[in-house]
C-alpha cells in the first residue's frame, strides 16, 4: 500500500460524530476527511460514514481515536457519579 493512499480509520452512522473525530485528528496534525455522509437520495437511509487519513498516518490516527474514546468514556462515567 502506498503511504499516500487514503484509508479508513473510523466508521459510524453519525455524520456529526465523524466530524468530531475529523476535527480532533486535524488538531493533532493529521489531515483527515469524512466520506459517505450523504443519504444518496434514499429517505430514511442510515449510511455508514467513514473518517479517512493517509496510510502513513493511520496507526497514529487509530491510537488517537482510541485515546479520545477512552477519555470520553471516563468523562461520561464521572458525570454520572
Image (cartoon, rainbow, N blue to C red):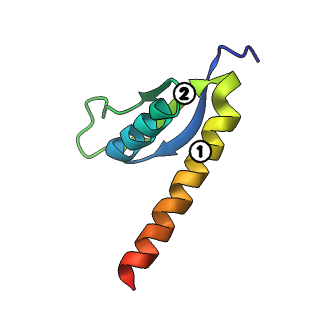
**Residue drawn where x is 27% and y is 36% of the image:** 42
In this orientation, which residue lies closer to the viewer: 9 or 78?
78
- Mark 2 and mark 1 in contact (Cβ < 8 Å)? yes
| Location of mark 1 (residue) | 64
Work out whether mark 1 precedes mark 2 in sequence or the reverse, and give the earlier one: 2
Residue 79, by quadrant, is bottom left
Tag 1, which secondary structure? helix
Horizontal side of residue 14 vs 10, given as left or right: left
| Location of mark 2 (residue) | 30
Q: For the view shown, which residue lies furthest in the bottom direction? A: 81
Q: How crowded is mark 2: few (under 14 residues within 10 Å), some or many (20 or more)?
A: some
Q: Is 2 rendered above or below residue 26?
A: above
Tag 2, which secondary structure? loop
Check the picture and name the quadrant holding the N terminus.
Answer: top right
In this orientation, which residue lies closer to the viewer: 78 or 62?
78
**Residue drawn where x is 48% and y is 35% of the image:** 50
**Residue drawn where x is 25% and y is 30% of the image:** 41
**Residue drawn where x is 49% and y is 67% of the image:** 73
Check the picture and name the quadrant holding the C terminus.
Answer: bottom left
Residue 35, by quadrant, is top left
In percent of width and height, residue 65 lies at 56, 46
Q: Is residue 49 in view?
A: no
What is the number of callouts on the image? 2
In percent of width and height, residue 72 lies at 46, 61
Horizontal side of residue 59 vs 8, given as left or right: right
Q: For the view shown, which residue lies furthest in the right direction? A: 1
Q: Residues within 10 Å of mark 1 (few under 14, many from 20)?
A: some
In percent of width and height, residue 66 lies at 60, 52
Q: Distance between the residues labelled 1 and 2?
A: 10 Å
In this orientation, which residue lies closer to the viewer: 45 or 60?
60
Amino acid at each position: 500500500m502506498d503511504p499516500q493512499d487514503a484509508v479508513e480509520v473510523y466508521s459510524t452512522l453519525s455524520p456529526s460524530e465523524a466530524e468530531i473525530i475529523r476535527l480532533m485528528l486535524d488538531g493533532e496534525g493529521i489531515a483527515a476527511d469524512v466520506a459517505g455522509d450523504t443519504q444518496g437520495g434514499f429517505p430514511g437511509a442510515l449510511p455508514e460514514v467513514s473518517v479517512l487519513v493517509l496510510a502513513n498516518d493511520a496507526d497514529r490516527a487509530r491510537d488517537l481515536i482510541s485515546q479520545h474514546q477512552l477519555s470520553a468514556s471516563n468523562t461520561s462515567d464521572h458525570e454520572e457519579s
